[in-house]
Amino acid sequence: MGVLEALVTVFTFPTILFLVAGLVIGTVLGAIPGIGGILGMAIILPLTSGMDGLSAIIGLIAIYVGAMYGGAVSAILFNIPGTNAAVTATLDGNPLAKQGKAMYALAISALSSSIGGVVTALLLLVLFPHLVPILNMFGTPQYFLVAVFGLAILPLISRGSQVKSIFAASIGLLTTTIGLAPMTLDIRYYFGVSMLYSGIDFVAILIGLFAITEMAFLAGTERSSIAKRGDGGNDLTRLDVSAVRDAARYVVSRPIALLKSALIGVGIGAVPGAGAAISTFVSYSEAVRSSDDESSFGEGNEAGLLAAEAANNSTANGSLIPVLAFGIPGSSASAIILGGMVLHGIVPGPVLFASSPQLLQTLFISMAVASVLVGVIGIFGITYLSFVTRVDKDVIVPLVIIFSLCGAITLNLNPVDVLTVAVFGVIGYLFRKYEYPVISLLLGAILGQIVETNLFRSLRLGGVEVFFEDWLSIVLIVAILAVLVAPHVRQPTLTSASQEV
Amino acid sequence: MSENTSTPDDPHVDAGHETTVRGFGVENLVEYAMLLAFVGITGGALVIADRYAYPADFFPKITSGIGLVSTLVILARKVRDDWGATARVQPVEINADELFVLGASLGYAVLGVLVGLLWVTPVFVFVYATWRNWSWIRSGVFALLSVGVPLFFTNYLAVDLSRGLVF
């Protein structure tokens, strides 16, 4: 009954409208190199303040899902990934386009993304009731330890040195100490400015880190748009039904590869700080490893494209697990979804699972519906998507900046948010330029209050001993120590693909 | 995204002012300046945190302390890499267009907060468009059209962007 009600909610106006609009917006933004879904979500997040919470979150999820597919469009057509997650799609997608099979490659991409997303969304729908008793085992001390684990794992999966990741995370954590202290009435670091009483909103930080930083890099690129790169002589002005049919036959004839890639996507997506850049790489590597014809990968092997694309939407779904369960984002995009939840008063965590199963069911079903629709939009929108890649960057850059700064003021009606966006745009630029992990900074800014609040609640409960009183805490402490020691034991092999932001 | 993976041995790397590899090239100075700024910020935060009573002082002390130590470690490593006998530092290019966008965004934000984003928006767009060598007329039309964005926020979200802190 609950699932049926959730299904009805998703298909009720205006929810379905926001879902479809989010998919279209995400697909279009994802197809434009330099924009991408994360930036699109960051810009649109403040605009959702006039909407009801559920519709806003569904709209944001739809943008994310759409962008995952959209990012592959320019990757396949022009060898320029619209998003980091689409980098792997260039490896075999673009060679296919160069062989005159662009429509075929785009259809494989759309269908793989779609099926991977549906499978994992339904998997989450089935599994989440079983998570409730597990999540109920998490009290304040365990919640603190999970947040620390989220911070500790960052150096392991983010590119660059461990000390840079620690530095970036500490700066993020420090931003959360501005304003009213969570457990006392002290106002910290406000320098007599009353507008700083409420602190710095992490949503403003993430808008700055993504929108402004990304626009600076886009302005610095030489191309005016990617259209000049050519599209391999493919005719994309009309839908090639036979190519789509061949792609559909190919995709449905490989259920094991689809399932394996989807599970890799959802599994890696659930790890805080990891993202589709890693999962698509791992999924692609697995496709190569399990193939009898390894040499054909990189030359236009459909199996490589299928593996990468089936993993990306699944990663989007998986990244919502730590957000919903603990309020800890698994990726930059899920951090924005978390921002949307906070903006609309939806508090993630174990209580959400126990008290609002209907909301979670609706979210999972909306993810499944979005995944189905992205296949439809992806196939029937192919003829239009190649057009959007021709948008002039000199139009994009100022518009995105205007939307970001005007949108920032809507977060709390506080001018500090506008300045925060601009300042963190500069910081994000410097971090990216000198290879400091931006994701560590962002997660620090998100997790700071969770860490501080739960630390003091735990200490009041029973001092330091409270962290060693049950097996779950011990397991979490061991896990934290393991991820801190791991980089010194063996260099991880996935770091080159791990820069999600 | 805009990674530079060249090494000092890369024949494509310009040894001139654009990609100075070692020592105090402009691009290198920017990173030193950033690190020194964070030394100041984290060090200042640590000192100020001492004024707060427990438990409000605990978390700021921990985070600023870790921030300060890690910044100093990075700074020390950087000095070692830049000036050591076996220094191999990846060159970093800083593009004028990128700096312009950052500077213009900062100026837009500050002026917008002071006098209202509605009035500063067309100015920002006009300056950006002329920087990108658009014609005066085209820049002016784009600037006028851009006012639609803050007007959209004003009408759709009922946020008054015509007023700033000054007037």
Image (cartoon, rainbow, N blue to C red):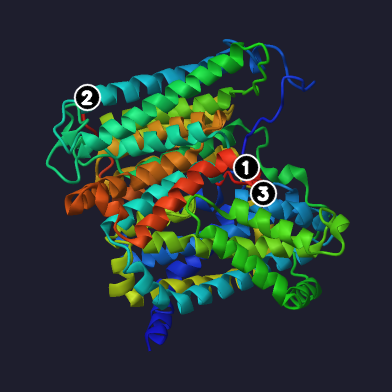
User: Closer to us: mark 1 or mark 3?
Assistant: 1
**Circle 2 sits on which residue?**
B48
Label 2 to label 3: alpha-carbon separation? 45 Å
Image location of residue A234, percent across then percent down: 81, 58
Image location of residue A287, percent across then percent down: 75, 62
Image location of residue A374, percent across then percent down: 59, 68
- Quadrant occupied by the N terminus of chain A: bottom left
- Tag 3 secondary structure: loop
The chain letter under disc 2 is B
Above-or-below relation of B64 to A444: above
| Residue placed most toward the observer, B24 or A326 | A326
B149 vs A318, left or right, is: left
The chain letter under disc 3 is A
Above-or-below relation of A379 to A150: below
User: Closer to us: mark 2 or mark 3?
Assistant: 2
Q: Quadrant of residue B150?
A: top left
A452 vs A127, left or right, is: left
A91 vs B79, left or right, is: right
Label 1 to label 3: alpha-carbon separation? 30 Å
Above-or-below relation of A441 to A109: above
Report the amino acid beneath label 1.
Answer: Arg
A189 vs A329, left or right, is: left
Circle 2 crowding by C-alpha within 10 Å: few under 14, some 14–19, many from 20: some
**Circle 3 sits on which residue?**
A81
Report the amino acid beneath label 3.
Answer: Pro
Circle 3 crowding by C-alpha within 10 Å: few under 14, some 14–19, many from 20: many
| Residue placed most toward the observer, A470 or A397 | A470
Label 1 vs 3, first from the N-terminus: 3
- Residue at 49% across, 32% down: A163
**Circle 1 sits on which residue?**
A490
